[in-house]
Amino acid sequence: MAKMQRWRRGRSAGEGTLVEEAPEQAAEAVPEATPEVELDELEATPEAERDGVPADVAAAEELEAEDADDVEADQPTDEELAAELVEETDAERAEDVDDADDADPDDVEPEDVTEDDTEDDTELERPPLPHVPDRTGFTGWLFGGRSPAEIVSIQLLQAAHAKQAITTALAMGLVAAVAGRPAREAGVVLVTVLVGQTILGWHNDIVDRQRDQAHGLTGKPIGAGRLDVGTAWYAIVVAFLLLVPLATTTGVRAGAYYLGSVAVAMLGNVVLRTGFFSWWSWAASYALLPAYLSWGGWGGKAVGSAPEPAIVALAALLGVGIHFMRAVWGLVADHEDGWTYLPLKLGLKLGATRLLALSTLFSVGVVVALVVVGARVGLSR
């Protein structure tokens, strides 16, 4: 067709007229398939009403959506935030370095330190305080505000094995009195034996100081470090100088026997103590005690005589029994140190409780035998 017709609606009259157009104009109008009147009506009609939604609701939703899009568009991304943070940190460091280079050391002010920070730093840097014993109350008044651990005499008393020393001294004084010795002689015997046993206790703790320290025995002043070894040796020398005149007061021969008993016991603290023959020193030292009593006299006069052999034998057995009784309390430490003495071997087989009971029963039986034999034949021949 040389010409095409197009229906156009008039705006004023509302009537349509046929208009002839050129082929070029007709070709440009081909894509518009919808009548112009329908397009105008669709443009005038809101999209929400076409979808069945009120116009005001749709407009509000569109505004909220646009605001949200604007807010999201204004928010920086994570990468942008990280980049900005790095740039600010680098800038601050550069400023600090410049300030430090330009600053005068005299004008530098210390940083603000709060009280809590000071307390925390002090607690971290302050070394732990040593244990300070309580020096108040009756004990503090009695010792002049000092701790018992600071008083040398108390530590010497604790290291002397006071219970064993007092018990042995009382027993020897009682035997001397029962044997018919005057009270003054019985008193001298008691004091002499007390001093001798004290020397043995100090010497024993000196020999065992390393073992006591290794096993953490707090009841041993020398091993625990509360009493110096030199102080203990000095006390032994002084006590020995006192022991010699005391022992010879009731007779030179009697005194020699008792000094020999002390020497054997001190040797037993060092020799054959850890093996099977650990009992030998206890037996020998106790066997010399009857001779000290039987040969004794006042003023150094040898008015006595030799002891009965049965009494000597029973005294030796008593020493063995006391050795077993004393050894029970240290079986665990001795076993850890590899000792192989007889009380330990029996303790491993019988148990410590049973060994203590048997040792006590044995010692009591020997004491009873001593009393019976002494009543029949006497202490000396």
Image: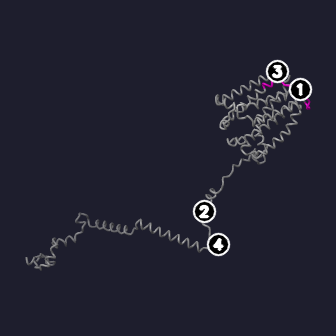
Which residue is rendered at x = 57% and y = 73% of the image? 99
- Give the mark nearest the N terminus, 2 or 1: 2
- Which is nearer the eye, 28 or 51? 28
Q: Where is residue 116 in the image (x, y as percent from the top left)?
A: 60, 59
Does the magenta-highlighted stretch encompass residue 307?
yes
Q: Name the residue under label 4.
A: 106
Tag in front: 2 or 1: 1
Residue 91 against residue 248 in the figure, above or below: below
Q: Residue type at mark 4: give it.
A: Asp
- Mark 3 crowdedness (10 Å alpha carbons): few <14, some 14-19, many ≥20: few
Q: Residue type at mark 2: give it.
A: Thr
Secondary structure category for the residue under label 2: loop
Q: Position of residue 369 (x, y in %)?
A: 77, 22
Q: Name the residue under label 1.
A: 304
Q: Where is residue 290 in the image (x, y as percent from the top left)?
A: 82, 27
Q: Mark 2 points at which residue?
A: 114
Residue stretch rendered in magenta on the structure: 298-314
Tag in front: 3 or 2: 3
